Structures are given as structure tokens and as C-alpha cells.
Image (cartoon, coloured by chain):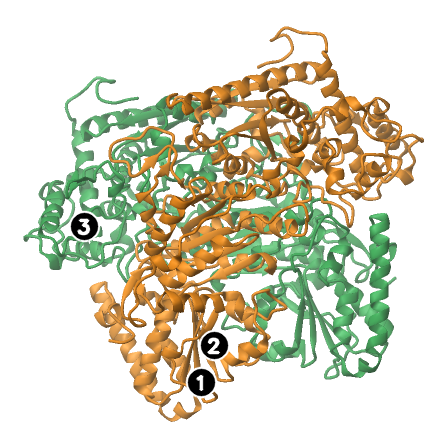
Chain colours: A green, B orange
């Protein structure tokens, strides 16, 4: 622990005076944002009318954030560092706004919030105020890539930012509350993945201010030696800085950061010279300062500073209670604003000068604004296409072909594209990428290990949270990536994707942010093919969750075969500002479209498959629609069943790749108009075989003409370890149920319906018996082809 | 590390012979389950037709699970332990099925799977076979409370089981893959919560078999001293057992478990005598054995045992490849089945006797089957009711009243009811419970801490995963609880609730399982009142996710006021076998129903509010429906607006508490029939103000008569830090938009519509200006009352 006495005391030096003044200014401005509407520099006695009617914000974490900001800025200047800052306690946005304002960036981004008294008034007023900026760090905050609302992802984001940025230090403040979350607890494992040769460094600053909203925090209250043990076990070298005397803390913090920077540089230099071993410990800071430090010590006889009571607004009756009002005035004046700001409200030169130049400022880092992006070079999907001599006669593993495409993409983009998966890259048959790269791994590599490599382009860890958090950090700093996952377990990151979608939606409206590359998911090992794993692995609901977010930023694709998967993946990788979810199986499955037809079909997003249809314009008996690979196969098989019983049935097959096409354009930007919709779906009844929960299709189409005669089959949470066809039968998504549903809607079949139904049920019974007896589907199912 | 040489070697003793035989038998039976259809004891030469056509299962983890089972059973016998087992690597269900069969329990639960040759054949055949049991531990497995599909929750489940079970040891095998997940990584913090006085002990057995599906695991590959450091930091005392020589491992494992049991007993005895301090380290095991141990060392020249290749089925071409077939036969015979099973297929006496008696068997523990339940004593909700002299004139904080009810409930159930929250109990205004109990906390307690207590009945940790996992473990062992959370962050546990719902659905069909108490959520600090926190805290989609699960096991309640909340909460706490989600605000809000009226309304689940309606039977112009507290308030205010413009408008107000009532009975057991639905909703157009995403209401009602004229207003992902009313306006859920929507549907208003619309838009503009200017809603909004 580096505190008073542990290193030689020196009188406050000039750098320390300057830094401390900057810190006081930032704290002053933070309090002002939380409390004041007007009278920003308290040049007249504080009146209730100067105070906001609704006091919203989080003070407790602010002083630690501003302190860290001040010290990191100093280190940037001293060492010409390329450093960005991720702040886990992003609900302390007041402190970060203040810092950006002091650095001048805030006024550059928001010219009306100028570096003067008027600008300061506006800075205060807009904070957590209708029409202004939120109380949490959001896309509005220059220099931030991290939404500060939901806790747990700061260290993963910083890690993602450091990947492939060899010159970067991604400093990361981690709140001790946040540190209790699962995602953060496993984020410490970053040391096993970050390459000192190819990546930048992550500098965690674990801020122990001791309290959450109401409770002490585990990491602050455990024994100091236990905390150290925990961090050392994860591969870090913690240096503790603590205290409540500003000068002492300044000195200790500066000293520790100096050691961190040197430590990082040593590790990287050794590795980049080709040696260094695996026993490195990355330096980090444990910062122990009081919650709400420099705020009022107590109010109404109750401790505030150093207590959970300073978490949000330390005292709130400021408009009604003269004592509270006086406390606020006294608190703000304790920062000695007259030393900090000039007559016109601008920071005094000493403070203005405490900032790195131009884009070295933490609040102006171009990589945090999407401004540093290398174009992605992508192979031609057609080069990797499956040969499809005719629809529905050959099989392929769709994801295996995608793996070959990704292999070439990884080769074309040696420092710009990463692939993430929770230990499932090979299981999901993307293993062709291992022909050109390995799995990122910094620990020992032993005989028998499969394609481990310290600089590999594939990151695998059994944590969807880490995969997602790393990828988000990588994308937010302008690079490209793909996360593949078992479909069901994408739910593990539901809350993370929701936050990311909110970020994208907000960021799109901010002119000084460039759109970042899209967040791309490949959901495979999907609900219909959990032959091994059964019910726990059967959940297609991630797309429902994603489609609850703003339509401007979410897309869902269900390619029916490999060539469509290639086309869709290529499209998604080229896109910006979106969350793209692709759902595709990995098992051998029938192929329908050649490369050209697939590209055209995916471009359209949905369309009539004429080759599978028997209708002509205006005479359609029934529409057999489908979305997803298994539903497409069962739909086509149902067509054959239908024609067997009613050879002259006029069937139209519609396949949907881009799910949002089903929605009206006013509901989703990919939606098609009612006229186009009707041209495809006609007025005939429609049987829709959908990959997931059927109500999603109803939701997208319920205002469509003819919706009352749309009958959706999908997943009804019936499942276990069983055969692929049995899974379909359990959920009535199989060819026989689909055919039966269709026949029930065609009036001219009514006379024969009972007979046909009985025959179809008989066939189902034969299947059922066979499956229960042999454990396998009938050969006629397994080997079914569209054209024999 | 306790291995060969580190303790004195002894010749294999009788206990070791017996235990080893049991282990070999369990492994033999596991391989049989994965591979064989017939010829279970290999009494004729193995033929392809004896082998399953589809080989499904996970071998790699099995030998570690069976080894642990054998040793724990021995410890139960030696020390008469009350011990249950949670197995994180539950995908190794073959091993657990085998153990339960050897213990006799399997045959007790499934009489056709008898302890003889025929039963063994059935045991093999049914495994991962259509109509049989899944390949993952599920509710089908006697003695298990843990669904083994999705990884990460084993240690939290074991912790939950140990709470309030002072005599119990909850042993918990944690896979080294699972250990990489976030939820597991933070689960080690259990030491800061488990009371050695009031709770049982958790005995983690971290099984390092080195590999996941394809990669080495972090915890197995990191330096041994780092792993120890990590675990010690979390408050554990790891004892390592490892090796690949069975006798050596048996000896070391037995020795280490002996030390663990003694260590646990010492800690508990000291604490229960009133001393012991806080510096305790709970013992645990680190078990390091080869993946796929005792399986084939290599196949086709590639290493299998001790490698990731043994993760699932080590070799699969058994029907086609004579060499593979021979390998399988040789592998199975290597366990010397002739020593293990009698002529009739029953285990030999030495093996049959290696089991604890009756309900002490791991597979027969009554608490794992819902068979140990103490009735919950609940206060009368009416005692805590808000006084409601007339509808809509007084305000109350609904959750504050619930807190008083929960306080009494906690007092009435001193060892049977726990409350869980991620640091938000007081913030969510349930703090009355702290009048009778504290927050569970084993670390130091300092001045200023708020109601910490080593045996408190409230568990708070900033991890929704831990809250959920602990509560699940507590419920699965027959006790009761409630998890309160900020609404948006319930998404953090989306995947966990999905798995729990699947478990409940499966368990309900298993006759020897008693229904366990329901999983109850209180989602508060909801989307409409994130004045402090803004967009990141605005997400009402958890109910959408929950309602995607089997309708038999999910319920969603949106009480409009405090008395309805009390009634609903009381109902949920009394229920079994369900996931209940209650959504209710914590802010001061209008109260509508007195205790009796609330109970009647909640019982009905939805109904006409006559006191707010102006229609009579058959003359309804428009139905104003609502679900949720804020939508209810805005709907009632909209009624007043409507009557102001069209005084003779015949309005019917419908309030929905139990959301599933909207669905037809064939879609949800709480659904009402179309006749009852029509009686409530009439044929008039309906404007439905719904708390969450509007399409959920459409989903529930889209097959209802009149659905085409149902217009749902809800959350459209428009939000930020702003006033409560502005949030409604941003999403068109406010009184003016609702009134306008209603008027647009009433033909007789058509002539005046333009005029009225302009007036309403003018009022919205006035509000908008006021909010942007003052930061507050207009007093007429803030102080609005139904009857002035």
C-alpha cells in the first residue's frame, strides 16, 4: 500500500498544485451539474430558485473518477501515452462531463456549452434534465465508449478496445459494486488472452470506495491480503493507493501510475523483442478513497462522506431547508472556485493547461468516436458457394462453408477482424479458420492442444459475457467481428445486447460519432438440432428479445441454406451501426439456391420460390411460407405431401430470409409496403413454418391484409434429446402437420379432409413407432430430397 | 497437493477395493448408456446391432463425477452426513444415472428399470433415446436439483440449498469449463454470506479435467499457485487431489474429504458455540484427473483420454468400423464387469452395499425431491392495506406497503423464507423488513453500516446471477423466497429463468417430485420511473421473455396499486411450481381499490372498473383498457379528458392485473373464454394502455373477437432521464395521446375531431415547454386526482 509515509513525503509540487486545482474544478462542476439551475459560480448568495427542482445524479463515485481522470491526463502528457478511459461507474457522468468541459472537448462537441459562465450554466442545467443529457455516461459523452447504466462490462470493454491496438493503454475504472457482478468477476481472466506483442494493455483501476447503494462492497471489506491474493491469482500485480488526504493520495497515485506505465512498457518491450515468458503479471491499481470524498462529511447528524449515503444526491431538501441550502453553498465554495475559474467562467490557465493536446485528450480520442476505422476486405461469397445443381438435391453444412469464407476474411484482415465464441468455433464447424490462425491463448501450450496461439484471431472462452464484452469493445473502437454461439445461450447476453442496441440508437443521432461496425451474431446449434443436448439447449427467443429494441438498429436473418448464409454474413460484416442476428444450422442440410440466386434472394429478403410453387398469378390455393433452414425443408416436404394428395393444388412457396421484411415499413426500416406484401402472400390462406416462437411472425404481420388467415407453426417449448424429425413433430412443424394445416384451409379439399387427415396421422404413427424403436428417423425422412 | 508419495502409501484396503469396484461399475454403466442398445453385460461378442445408431452423450466428465459420487457416499456412511450433491457438469448425466441405478433409487423411481439384466438393458437404451431421458441431468434424475445444460450456476445452487439447512453439506462439483463463466466466477463469494451458525456448508469440488469441447480450461492451465491464490482470496482453503493412478487418487481423495468434513465441522461448531471469528476459510477440493479417465487412451493414433477428444463420444464409427467396435468392447471389459455384476445383472453385494441407507443415498435425498417443505405462514394482506377512502384520491408507495407485509412474513417464517435483491432492497422501498432482520453479511461490520447481520434474512449482492441462483437453490430444496430487482436488469438472468421454467415444466410430470415453491419476482423501479437513471434502466421485456416459456408454469401480474400488489404477492408466495413475475412501481402513486375490492379484482385477474366507467350494457363507445400502475393512471386521466370534450361519451374502463387472462384458455391456463372476454371488452373499439412492449398484448389477444379494433399503446424504446409525464409522452402512453386515440375510433366524434386534436396537441405543447423550462411536470399532472 502506497500511502502517507510509505514513500518519502515532499512538499506539494507544482504539478500537484495544478492537478489538484483541476480536480477541485472538476468536482465543483460535478456538484453544480447535480444541483444548480443557475448562479453557477455562486457569485451571488445561493437561493432556492438557483437549485434544480428534481435533483438527479450520483455523487458518490464522482471524486474517484475525476481524480483518476486528472492523474491519467498527467501520465498522457508525461509519457506521450496513447490512452483511453473506460469508466465502469458510468453513473458518475457528472464528473466525466466536467472533465470533458475542462478539456475543451465538450464545447467543441456542443458549441452552446461554451467554456465560459454561460456555457457553465448550460452544462449544469442540461445534466439529467429534460432535453439534456442523461445522468449516466452515454453516447452523448465525448471520449466514452461505455454505457454506464448496467454494471459489469467495463473491464471486458477495455479488453476489447486493447485487442489489436498495440500502442494503446485502455485504462479502466472498475467500481467495487460492479466488481461483484459475474461478468466482471470473470473479466479478470483477460490476462490469459491479451497478447503483449500484438495487443495494447489494459490498466484496471479497481476503485474501492467501500459502498454500493446501501451495502458495503465485498472487495472493499474483504481482507486486504485476500483481495491481493484474488487479483494475483488472476495474473495481475495490484498496487494499492489509498487515503483521504488529497496531497498524499496525489503523490501515491502518481507514483503508482508511473510504475504501472513502466511495468506495461517492460512487458510489451520484452514480448516484442521475442522473449518475456508467460510469467508476466500485468500491473493494476487498487484505489481506496472515501465514497463522496470532498463532499459534506455529515448532514443532519448522519455520516455522508465515506458512507453509502453519498451514493446519489447526498442531501436533497435544498429548496426547502435553509440548512441544506447553506450546506450546499459551503460545500461548493470549499473547492475555492475563485481560484479555479476566471471572471468569464473559463477555467484559469493552470487548469486549462492540465490537458493533453488535441486528440490525446481522453475526451477527444478518435478511436472512441468511431473515427479510426480500417476498411474491411472481404472475399467474394461466391467463391465459397456450395455447388447447387438443382434445388434440394445436395446437402452441405452451412456453417462449414461460412468457416471457409471467414478463413479468407481473417487472412485478408490481419489486424481488423476477430472471431469470438464460447469454446464452440470448431463444434459450430467454423474450423476452417484454423487453417490460417489459432485460438488466442497466453497460458502454457501443451502437446495435443488444438490450434492455440498467443496471437490467434479467434478468441474462445466459456463465457458468453466475455465474448460479447470483448467484441463490443473491439467494435466500439472501430474494428470488425463476429460472435458465434449456440442459439439458446445467446440469452446469457440478453441484457448486454439490449444496452448495446440502446447505445447504437443514441450514437446514431450524435453528429460527431461515426457509425461503428455492426455487432454480428451467428446463432447456430439451434433449437431444432439439439440431438445431443435436449431441452436446455432449445430456445429460439434471442431474436424476439433483439426485435424488441429500436427497429432502426436491429436486423434478423434466417438463411435457408449455405449460399444464403454466405450472402447474409457478407452483408452483415459490411454493415455499420446495427445488431445483426443470423440463425443458421450447422448440420448437413439440403441446399436450394446457387450463389447468384442466393444473393438475389437475400437482397430481396423474402420472395416466392417459383421452382417450388405450383400456382400461377391469381389462382393460389394456399401459401406455404417458411423462415429458417429446418422449417424450409419441412415446408418443401409438405408441398410434396400436398401434391401427392391433391395433385392439382396451387401452392405458392414463400421463403423469408430477412425477418423484418414482414413488418410494415412504418414499423421497421426493412419492412415492405402492403402492396408488395400482398403480391407475395396473395389473398390465399398462408401456413407459415417459422424457426422460433410463432407469435413473433404474428407480431410482424398482424396489421397485414389477410393476417386472419395466416397460421404460424413454430416452437412451442416442446423438446428433449430426440431425433430431428421428432423435434418437428413435437412442435407440429413437420411436413405432415404443415400439410394438414394447409389442407384444412383449402375449401375444395373439404370433402376429402377426413380421409387425408387419417392417412397423415397414420404416417406420423409409423414414424413415431420407428423412432421409439430404433432411435432414428426413417430413411425416407433422413434422405428426403426435393427432386429425387 | 495430496498425491502419491505425499501421504504414506498403504496397500489397497477393503474400503478402497469396494469403492473402486463401485466406481468401475458406474463407469461401465455410463459407457453402456452412451453406446449400447443391447447385450448390456457383453455376454455375447459385441455386434454392430448391439450399438445405438445415434451415439449421444458426454463421456469426458463422467469418471470424475462417478469417482466423486463414490467417495461422497463413503463419507456419508463414515460420518452419517446429511449431504446432497450438485453437479455442474450435468451433461455427464450417464454417470449420475449409473450411480442412482447402483444405489437402487433408479429402480424405485422407474420400476421397469430394475436392478437386473433387463433393467440394465432398459437403462442403456433409454439414455438420450427418443422417449427416454435426456443426456443432461434434468428433473428425471433422482437426487438432482440442477439442470446440467447451461453452465454457470452449480455453486450458486449449492449455496442456496445450504441456506437455512444447518445440518446439510451441499457438495458441488464445478467443471473447469463452467468455472470460466461469469456467474460461477462470482459464486466463490458465497463465503461472505454463508452463516456457519444458521446455514449448512457448501463443499466445492473444482474438477480440473483440463479441457472444454476444444480448448484447455483456464483454471486447469494457470499456475497451480495462481489458482490457489485465487481461491484463497475468495475465502476458501483448497486441497488438491490429483493423479491418474486410481488407488493413489482414492487414497488422496478420501484423505482430503476427511479433512474437509472435519474442517466444516470445526468451523460450524466454533460458530455455534458463539465464537470463531471471521477469519475462517471453508475447505474445498481441487480435483485434477484426466478428462475421459479410464477410457481409451488413443484412437486412430490420436490421444483421447486426457484430451478434449473425450468430451462427448470418444469414437463414433462403432457400427461401421470393426476396430472401433473392438475398442469399445475392450474398453467396457477393462472394467471387469464379471466382478461387478451377478449372473442376473444385479450389482454384486460388495457394490450394492456401498451406499448409504434409505434417504441418505445421494440419489434419494428428500430435500432434492421437494419432499421436505415447511408450510409458509403469511400475514393477512388486508392488515397492511392502504386506506383508500375513494378511488384515485390518495397516494402511496406500493412497494413500501409490501415491505411491511414482507416484514411480518419474515418474522413468521424464521427459517423458511428469504428475500434476495441486488443491493436494492431499501432503494426499492422494502426496508420495513429491516425492522425485524438484517442483511446477511459475514465480513467485518463497521460503524455506519446499515442493518448488516451474520444471520440476516435478506441477501443482497450486486449480482442478479447470484440472487437468482441462490433463490433457485433455496426453492429447489423446498423453501420460499422473493427476488426484487430493477425491472430492466431482470434481463441479466433471462437465461437462468428460462432454464428454471424448463425444469419446473419437466418436474411437474414426474410423480415422485413434489411441486416446489414458486420463483417469485418483484420487478420494480420500472421503465416509466427511471427519473434518475434514464435509458439504460428502461426495459420492460422480461415479461415477454418469461411468457415465451411453457404457459403451464409462467404467470405475470401488473397490480395497479398497493392493495392489488399485496393481494398478488400473497397469492404468489402461496403458490407452487410457477415462475411469477410481479411488476409494480415504488414511487408515490394513486390508490384505487380498498383491500376487499383489490382482493376481488386480483382474484378475477381483470375486470371492468364500474366506478370509472360511464357506459351501460350494450352502449359502450370505447373501452379504455390498462395494465400496469402508470398506464392505469394515464388511462383514468384520459377518461377525464375525454369526458371534458365529449361529456356523454360512454366509456368502459377495464383493468388487467393477471396478463395471461387476456389469452384464450387453450393458450394459457389462466386465459378466459371468448364469451367472458367479450362481456368485458364488448364490441367497441379498445385503447389499451400497457406497461411494456405493446405487441405482447396483441400476441395475447390476436385471436380474440374485435382484435382488429384493439389499439395498444406501450413502450417503444423512447426514453432518457426525464420527467415521469414526459416519458409517457415520448411513448404516446400519456392521457392526451390515449384520449386522442380513443376519439379517433368513435364515429360520432368525427365532426369535431380536428378541433379536439388541436386542443390536445396544444396542451402537450404547453407541457413540453414547461418541462423543458423547469425540469418538472406541471402541477396539474403531478397532483392529478381522479376525484378532486
- Up the image or down, B71 lies above or below A156; here it is above
Q: Quadrant of the C terminus of chain A?
A: bottom right
**Secondary structure state at the residue bearing disc 2:** strand
Q: Which residue is mark 2?
A: B711
Tell me which residue sits at (5%, 53%) in the image: A44
Q: Quadrant of the N terminus of chain A?
A: top left
Q: Which residue is mark 3?
A: A32
Tell me which residue sits at (25%, 18%) in the image: A6
Question: Which of the chains bears the disc numbered 3?
Answer: A
Position of A102 with respect to B558 (left or right) is left
- Up the image or down, B423 lies above or below A747; here it is above
Question: Which of the chains bears the disc numbered 1?
Answer: B
- Up the image or down, A725 lies above or below B192; here it is below
Question: Which of the chains bears the disc numbered 2?
Answer: B
Measure how far apart labels 1 and 2 are at the Cα level: 10 Å
Nearer to us of marks 3 and 2 is: 2
Position of B542 with respect to B530 (left or right) is right
Quadrant of residue A253 in the image?
top left
Measure how far apart labels 3 and 1 are at the Cα level: 48 Å
- Seen from the viewer's position, the closer of residues B683 and B526 is B683
Q: Which residue is mark 1?
A: B745
- Visible residue check, residue A397: yes
- Seen from the viewer's position, the closer of residues B189 and B446 is B446
How many numbered dots are placed on residues in this image?
A: 3
- Seen from the viewer's position, the closer of residues A560 and A366 is A560
Label 3 neighbour load within 10 Å: few <14, some 14-19, many 20+: many
For the residues beneath circles 3 and 1, the answer to whether they share a chain is no
For the residues beneath circles 3 and 2, the answer to whether they share a chain is no
* Residue A557 percent location from the top left of the image: 61, 59
Disc 1 + disc 2, Cβ < 8 Å:
yes
* Residue A778 percent location from the top left of the image: 86, 55
**Secondary structure state at the residue bearing disc 1:** loop
Amino acid at each position: 500500500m502506497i500511502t502517507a509515509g510509505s514513500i518519502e513525503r515532499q512538499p506539494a509540487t507544482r504539478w500537484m498544485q495544478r492537478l489538484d486545482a483541476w480536480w477541485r474544478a472538476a468536482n465543483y462542476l460535478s456538484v453544480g451539474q447535480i444541483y444548480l439551475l443557475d448562479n453557477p459560480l455562486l457569485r451571488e448568495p445561493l437561493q432556492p430558485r438557483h437549485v434544480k427542482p428534481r435533483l438527479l445524479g450520483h455523487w458518490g463515485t464522482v471524486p474517484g473518477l475525476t481524480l483518476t481522470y486528472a492523474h491519467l491526463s498527467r501520465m498522457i502528457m508525461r509519457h506521450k501515452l496513447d490512452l483511453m478511459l473506460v469508466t465502469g461507474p458510468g453513473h458518475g457522468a457528472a464528473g466525466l462531463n466536467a472533465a470533458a468541459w475542462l478539456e475543451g472537448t465538450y464545447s467543441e462537441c456542443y458549441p452552446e456549452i461554451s467554456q465560459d459562465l454561460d456555457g457553465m450554466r448550460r452544462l449544469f442545467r442540461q445534466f439529467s434534465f429534460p432535453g439534456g443529457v442523461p445522468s449516466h455516461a452515454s453516447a452523448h459523452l465525448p471520449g466514452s465508449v461505455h454505457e454506464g447504466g448496467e454494471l459489469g462490462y467495463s473491464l471486458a470493454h477495455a479488453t476489447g478496445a486493447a485487442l489489436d491496438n498495440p500502442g494503446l493503454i485502455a485504462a479502466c475504472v472498475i467500481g467495487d459494486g460492479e466488481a461483484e457482478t459475474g461478468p466482471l468477476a470473470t473479466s479478470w481472466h483477460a490476462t490469459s488472452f491479451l497478447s503483449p506483442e500484438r495487443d495494447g494493455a489494459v490498466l484496471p483501476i479497481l476503485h474501492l470506495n467501500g459502498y454500493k447503494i446501501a451495502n458495503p462492497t465485498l472487495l472493499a471489506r474483504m481482507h486486504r491480503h485476500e483481495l491481493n491474493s484474488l487479483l494475483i491469482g488472476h495474473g495481475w500485480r495490484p498496487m494499492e493507493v489509498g487515503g483521504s488526504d488529497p496531497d498524499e493520495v496525489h503523490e501515491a497515485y502518481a507514483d503508482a501510475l508511473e510504475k504501472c506505465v513502466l511495468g506495461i512498457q517492460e512487458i510489451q518491450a520484452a514480448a516484442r523483442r521475442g522473449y518475456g515468458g508467460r510469467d508476466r503479471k500485468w500491473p493494476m491499481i487498487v484505489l481506496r478513497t472515501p465514497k463522496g470524498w470532498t463532499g459534506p462529511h455529515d448532514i443532519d447528524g448522519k455520516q455522508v462522506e465515506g458512507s453509502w449515503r453519498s451514493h446519489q444526491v447526498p442531501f436533497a431538501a435544498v429548496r426547502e431547508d435553509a440548512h441544506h441550502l447553506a450546506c450546499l453553498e459551503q460545500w461548493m465554495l470549499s473547492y475555492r472556485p475563485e481560484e479555479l475559474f476566471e471572471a468569464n467562467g473559463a477555467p484559469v490557465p493552470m487548469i486549462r493547461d492540465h490537458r493533453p493536446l488535441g486528440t490525446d485528450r481522453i475526451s477527444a480520442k478518435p478511436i472512441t468516436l468511431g473515427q479510426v476505422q480500417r476498411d474491411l476486405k472481404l472475399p467474394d461469397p461466391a467463391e465459397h458457394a456450395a455447388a447447387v445443381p438443382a434445388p434440394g438435391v445436395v446437402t452441405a453444412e452451412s456453417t462449414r462453408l461460412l468457416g471457409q469464407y471467414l478463413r479468407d476474411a481473417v487472412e485478408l484482415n490481419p489486424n481488423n477482424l476477430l472471431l469470438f465464441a464460447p469454446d464452440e468455433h470448431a463444434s459450430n464447424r467454423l474450423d476452417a479458420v484454423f487453417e490460417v490462425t489459432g485460438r488466442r491463448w497466453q497460458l502454457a501450450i501443451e502437446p495435443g492442444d488444438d490450434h492455440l496461439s498467443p496471437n490467434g484471431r479467434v478468441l474462445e472462452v466459456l463465457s458468453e459475457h466475455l465474448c460479447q464484452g470483448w467484441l463490443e469493445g473491439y467494435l466500439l473502437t472501430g474494428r470488425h467481428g463476429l460472435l458465434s454461439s449456440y442459439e439458446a445461450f445467446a440469452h446469457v447476453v440478453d441484457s448486454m445486447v439490449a444496452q448495446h442496441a440502446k447505445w447504437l440508437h443514441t450514437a446514431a443521432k450524435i453528429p460527431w460519432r461515426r457509425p461503428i461496425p455492426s455487432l454480428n451474431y451467428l446463432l447456430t446449434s439451434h433449437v431444432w438440432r439439439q440431438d445431443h443436448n435436449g431441452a436446455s439447449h432449445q430456445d429460439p427467443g434471442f431474436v424476439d428479445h433483439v426485435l424488441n429494441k429500436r427497429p432502426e438498429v436491429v436486423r434478423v436473418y434466417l438463411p435457408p441454406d449455405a449460399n444464403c448464409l454466405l450472402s447474409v454474413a457478407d452483408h452483415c460484416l459490411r454493415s455499420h451501426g446495427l445488431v445483426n442476428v443470423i440463425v443458421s444450422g450447422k448440420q448437413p442440410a439440403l441446399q436450394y439456391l446457387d450463389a447468384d440466386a442466393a444473393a438475389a434472394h437475400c437482397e430481396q429478403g423474402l420472395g416466392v420460390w417459383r421452382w417450388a410453387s405450383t400456382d400461377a398469378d391469381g389462382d393460389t390455393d394456399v401459401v406455404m411460407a417458411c423462415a429458417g433452414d429446418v422449417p424450409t425443408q419441412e415446408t418443401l416436404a409438405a408441398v410434396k405431401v400436398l401434391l401427392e394428395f391433391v395433385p392439382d393444388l396451387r401452392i405458392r412457396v414463400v421463403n423469408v430470409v430477412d425477418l423484418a421484411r414482414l413488418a410494415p415499413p412504418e414499423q421497421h426500416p426493412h419492412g415492405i409496403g402492403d402492396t408488395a406484401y400482398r403480391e407475395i402472400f396473395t389473398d390465399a390462406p398462408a401456413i407459415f413454418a417459422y424457426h422460433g416462437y410463432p407469435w413473433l411472425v404474428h407480431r410482424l404481420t398482424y396489421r397485414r391484409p389477410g393476417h386472419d388467415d395466416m397460421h404460424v407453426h413454430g416452437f412451442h417449448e416442446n423438446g428433449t434429446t430426440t431425433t430431428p424429425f421428432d423435434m418437428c413433430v413435437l412442435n407440429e412443424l413437420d411436413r405432415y402437420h404443415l400439410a394438414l394445416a394447409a389442407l384444412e384451409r383449402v375449401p375444395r379439399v373439404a370433402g376429402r379432409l377426413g380421409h387425408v387427415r387419417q392417412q397423415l396421422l397414420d404416417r406420423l404413427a409409423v414414424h413415431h413407432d420407428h423412432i421409439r424403436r430404433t432411435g432414428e428417423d426413417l430413411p425416407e425422412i433422413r434422405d428426403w430430397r426435393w427432386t429425387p
